[in-house]
Amino acid sequence: MATKPPRDSELEAILEKVRQVRNFDFRNYKRATLQRRIERRMQATRCRSRAAYLALLERDPAEVNTLVSSMLIKLTSFFRDREVWQALEQSMAELVRQRPDAELRIWSAGCATGEEAYSLAIIAAEALGPGYPGAELKVFGTDVDEDAITTARRGIYTPEQLENVSPERLSRFFVRTGNNYTVRKEIRRAVVFGVNNLVSDAPVSRIDIILCRNVFIYLDSDLQKRVLARFQFALRRNGLMVLGRSELIPFAARLFRPIDLGRRIYRKDGHSEVTSTTQDRLPPEPSSLPRIIEPSADFERSFLRNLLDSHPCPHIATDNDGTVTLWSRAAARMWSRNEGEVLGKKLAALGLAGLGGDLLIEQSQRVRSGASERETSDGLMEAANGEPIALRTQVAPLRDKEGERQGLLYIVHDTTHLRGVEQALRATQEELQAINLRMQSSTEELRASNEELETTNEELQSANEELQTTNEELQSTNEELETTNEELQSANSELDATNRELAHRTLEMDALTFCQRTIIRTLSAAVLVLDGDGRITTWNLAAERLLGLTERETIGQLLWSLHVPALKRALLLKLRRQLKEKRSLRMDGIPYQLPHGGKGSATLVATPLITDTHVLGSIILFEDTTRATALQEENRRLQEKLKE
């Protein structure tokens, strides 16, 4: 089994400081997430080490509050992830059709500033139909952050926060208040907000739908299992649980049945806690099946068996590998399976209703390994008449005469009556909690109204002193800002002048570039401009006409690698050598083939473009002199005839 990496002592000290000051226990949250949040605060406070940041937390309790706020991410919005809400709308409508007169109870766990809780109330009101919601709808919004809950109770949101709300819903469920929108009272009455820690506080009970998105990504596997177990307890039979898209938790499939795994929607199933037990965690089948009762005498064997069979509580014994070695008569009556059907089989593979996966795997392993002397687990099974039976199972080690563990003994008690009393008590507590939450909400609203309408003399005096101090600081800062402003204005004037000069020169350069290109393209001589590597950057119209290649075929190509009909290979090699040596070249009377097929002659002039420091490239002029040569030859013949 892999061991957990050692924990950073400085990080643990920071988390312990947060727990002492704010009573937030982040010790089982994912370390990578906590480290990122702490490093951001270290950068913001310019602390170079965690020791320095811990010293800052010791000096400044306000920084502890800031750190906790940065750790409690409140990323939420109305109807976020539209596909999930479409599936929820369908499930909500189906739930209302199946139970038209029953109370609808919904829990938004980790609701942050309340957007998702109000979204749930809106789609529930639409599913219930006109005239709703009323007392038949309860939406519980809980979060560990008190400031976020206070914001949620107000129910006031900006237009940007309501971008995903359709115009119809906006007009029906919200009221315009100034530049913002307020949730209507009918919806606010149906939503009860309260502070609740999913890990340590009691869950809300008898819930039909739980929406908890982007909370599990911050918890380690142990906390994830604990919270999922609380959710299973809180949900009614066939209730729905919706997690975030990025929260694919394998353990969830042991307690819930996935109905839309892509959208992370699960359903509580009466048999899921047994049938979802993974066989890969069970030990292999033993080659032989030992029995826990192997007395030396038949009388002792018969006496012990009769003793167990006469007990009204079911008894099940297994060896250390989890194989059933004893099945009492009460167990056979409860699960309608005789001894021959179960002996020699894995207890976890039998799918016994009421015996959950945690009991058969984790809790049994703790007893088997000696980490715990006794474990207790509660479960439910359905009787033949359809009524649920509450079971409480105790698992204890079986020991031989020498005290060695030989297996496990499971003793099952029917606690239906006790569970009914507990449920009634829990329902009463839940109602009291709801009333307290409503009273807390009303108190908060009254306090907020009083704070808006009245201010005390002490607050005014304190604010006045702070304002005087702030005023002095602002005056000093204002003087510094005025000096800085004058400097900035001077620098801005210089930059404006420079920008205007640059813009003017840019226009002049654009005009010169345009004129240059136009002149080059209209020259009768072929103009080739090369960069320092010999690649062609300019190829005018005369070059296309005289050299037989288009501009598109030549731009960006190495002149020395092109096949130019008018420039023979020897001429190109000589031209390349001269330019490489930074020397000009002029050649007259170069014979070449005219584009129409005849023979012609031309003059070639190549000049390197050299600055004081390096070579920019070169320019080559190729001018057709066929007509001029013919005229000179004709003139020479005429002169010879005149001499004769």
Image: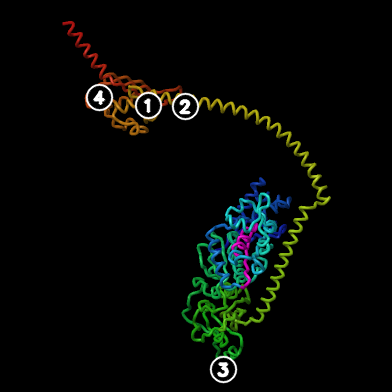
Task: Residue 305: give x, y in percent of width and height.
Answer: 57, 90
Could you tell which of marks 3 and 4 lies nearer the N-terminus?
3
Q: Quadrant of the N terminus?
A: bottom right
Question: Disc 1 versus disc 4: distance between alpha carbons?
Answer: 21 Å
At a point 52% along the width and 68% down the height, the residue shown is 258
Question: Disc 4 versus disc 2: distance between alpha carbons?
Answer: 37 Å
- Between circles 3 and 4, the one closer to the viewer is 4
Could you tell which of marks 2 and 3 lies nearer the N-terminus?
3
Q: Mark 2 and mark 4 in contact (Cβ < 8 Å)?
A: no
At a point 49% along the width and 80% down the height, the residue shown is 345
- Between circles 1 and 2, the one closer to the viewer is 2
Q: Can residue 273 be seen in this snapshot?
A: yes
At a point 31% along the width and 32% down the height, the residue shown is 562
Going by the numbered disc 2, the residue's amino acid type is Asp
Whether residue 561 is situated above or below residue 578 in the rendered picture: below
Could you tell which of marks 4 and 2 lies nearer the N-terminus?
2
Q: Quadrant of the C terminus?
A: top left
- Between circles 2 and 3, the one closer to the viewer is 2
Question: Disc 3 versus disc 4: distance between alpha carbons?
Answer: 126 Å
Report whether 558 appears left or right of 216.
left
At a point 71% along the width and 58% down the height, the residue shown is 22
Q: Which label number is shown at residue 529?
A: 1
Mark 4, residue position: 592
Report whether 18 appears left or right of 222.
right
Q: Can residue 219 be seen in this snapshot?
A: no
Mark 2, residue position: 510
Bounds of the magenta segment: 101-124
Mark 3, residue position: 299
